[in-house]
Image (cartoon, coloured by chain):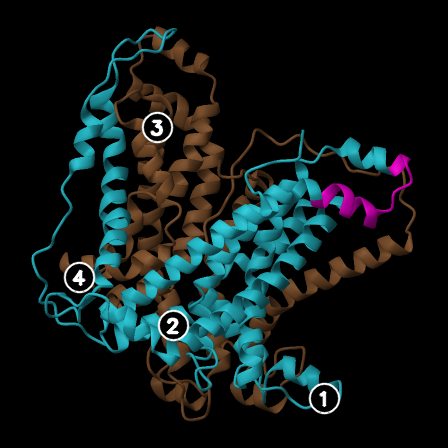
Amino acid sequence: MTIASSSPPSRLPPGGAERTATRSSTDRRPGTGENRGDGRLAAVFIGPALLGFVVFLLWPTLRGIYLSFTRFNLLTPAEWVGLDNYVRMAHDPIFWSSLRVTVVYVIINIGVQTVSALAIAVLLQRLTQSALLRGIVLTPYLMSNVVAGIVWLWILDTQLGVGNEIVAALGFDRIPFLADETWAIPTIALINVWRHVGYTALLLFAGLQAIPNDMYEAAKVDGASEWRMFWRITMPLLRPVLAVVLIMTVIGSFQVFDTVAVTTRGGPADATNVLQYYIYGAAFGRFQFGYASAMSVALLVVLSAITFVQYRLTRAGQTDLG
Amino acid sequence: MTAVTVPTAPAPQATPVRPVRRRPTPGRIVAWVVLAVIVLVTLVPFYWILRTALSTNSGLAASPGDPLPVDPTAGGFERALGLQSTKEAIAQGGAGGGLRFWRYLLNSVVVSTLVTVCQIFFSAMAAYAFARLRWRGRDQVFTLFLAGLMVPTIFTLLPNFVLIKELGLVDSLLGIALPTMFMTPFAVFFLRQFFMNVPREVEEAALLDGAGKVRIFFRVLLPMASTPVLTLAVLTYITSWNDYFWPLMVSYSDGSRVLTVALAVFRAQTPQTGTDWSGLMAATLIAALPMLVLFGFFARRIVSTISFTGIK
């Protein structure tokens, strides 16, 4: 795939934000020896980061929204088409099926991952405090999604994969995990659980460390079982941390692309054509950057809505820990 | 996925909960079994990569379930590293298309190093400006940065690609590195939290000695922040090394191809005889090895400093 480079003059955003940074202010805080602000110095310190922020985050965000209202193929200037892309999206059955596939993926991925991560975190806290074990559960996270995808593609290969050797040895029919419409999405979801669960568990583990130990001690004196302590102490006190981790992982999960790209490439028959893969195809396969941007905006809206709802439902901002 | 990790002061080592009661109850036995299964599921794929990489393709086809390498050979590694002649490679079930492994490895190292060093340095400078310097508009700009945390990375990829193309940097290593070289809102936020928690007395003592704020940043605060900076740097390096989607968009030729993209290409070029699993697993292992080594060096520090902060 090549793209002719007939680029229009690059439009860099004006450095307006930087200018505000350079103005010094009079310091009104008592107690320190300095009376004047650090305007000029601050400009130097904040400069590079602010430049990066404006050029590669703020500007692209605004531009992505703008592009969603245009027809744009990279070669000719973007042409304003109003809501055309959104109308098209509403009538595009593949878009809706992609969205559905993505949601199913997220539900399986997040469901299994959260429960497993919680279990691992609790085991690492209540059973053993071994740092070695914490290191071990983190190792899959060091692999790229590409590596994880390829490895499991091999392990689950219908003919030669050891996974299917085991399935066959147990007396079942071989399962075409990544080549079957029903199996493919759950399989990809579980591959990504394998890679991310340890990291998620460590975040939860860190949250568990904040729960005072004497709570468990006191409960034990009262004769509470581990099971009861989990539901009465761990869960309520971990809730704020769990909520933030959940929001983060759900956002990450919706962006699934790599694993699909190396294992199934959206197939069989669009069964794993997740939204991000469809967007990529629209942009780089068919050069419909406007339409691809519109779908990105849709994803952004969905993610913002989910974050908002989750935040409200789980009261992530509050803590029950006195 | 952004990491939500903030190093705290050496976390009060939670004392083992029950050194007193060590009797194996049925519950504890079940718990240990579950943990053992988790460790097994975590580690067995790594062994399987190694076992496959050391087997021949014909051997793999003959005895797919053999727990040991079949007809042990280094052929897979030789193919992955491009040490075999095309004829040899095809004879052993490879694609014959040379994988310029060293080139891709170098590209990955250049991109990840560039991203990590610049991003952390610039983010630390910004974090210092937010935490310690006084300037008009500081709180507004910081709020803006925080809002940046809400934008999923993936949303900015398409417009960023358009921008990189306009800058004429498509298919270059700089084009891959540039968008994440200056900052991530997370890195700034993370380091700002740390600088905020450094007692002001530390700096005031240095100020009295006549040190300027620049000097304080480089000589006092930055060294104090070595542990969070290290944790952040390793996580940034790993993230950058493992990134696939963005380099896939930007790079088109060997000159800018990084390992993740090369692996996916290697996987896609299926030779006549079916996938070259032995070579592919060898390549996978070599691609992942640097991160395993990197993590091996810093594991203890990282694992014990990964701690949590809600974004408040």
- For the C terminus of chain A, the quadrant is top right
Most foreground residue, A231 or B204: A231
Q: CA distance from mark 2 to mark 4?
A: 21 Å
A225 falls in the magenta region: yes
| Numbered tag placed on residue B7 in the rendering | none
- Please report the residue visible at 67 percent of the width from the left and 59 percent of the height from the top: A116
Identify which residue, B285 or B218, lies in the foreground.
B218
Q: From mark 1 to mark 4, how far is it between C-alphas?
A: 52 Å
Q: Residue at x 44, y 37 (%)?
A: B190
Residue at image mark 3: B130
Expressed as whole percent of the image width and height from the top left, the position of residue A100 reads 48, 73
Identify the colour of chain A in the image: cyan
Is the residue at mark 1 from the same chain as the one at mark 4? no
* Chain under numbered label 4: B
Residue A172 numbered mark, or none: 1
Amino acid type at mark 3:
Phe
Q: Is residue B252 visible?
A: no
Amino acid of disc 2: Tyr
Residue at mark 2 shares a chain with residue at mark 1: yes
| Magenta region, residue range | A220-235
Look at 16% across and 31% down and name the residue there.
Answer: A19
Where is residue B114? Give x, y as percent: 30, 48
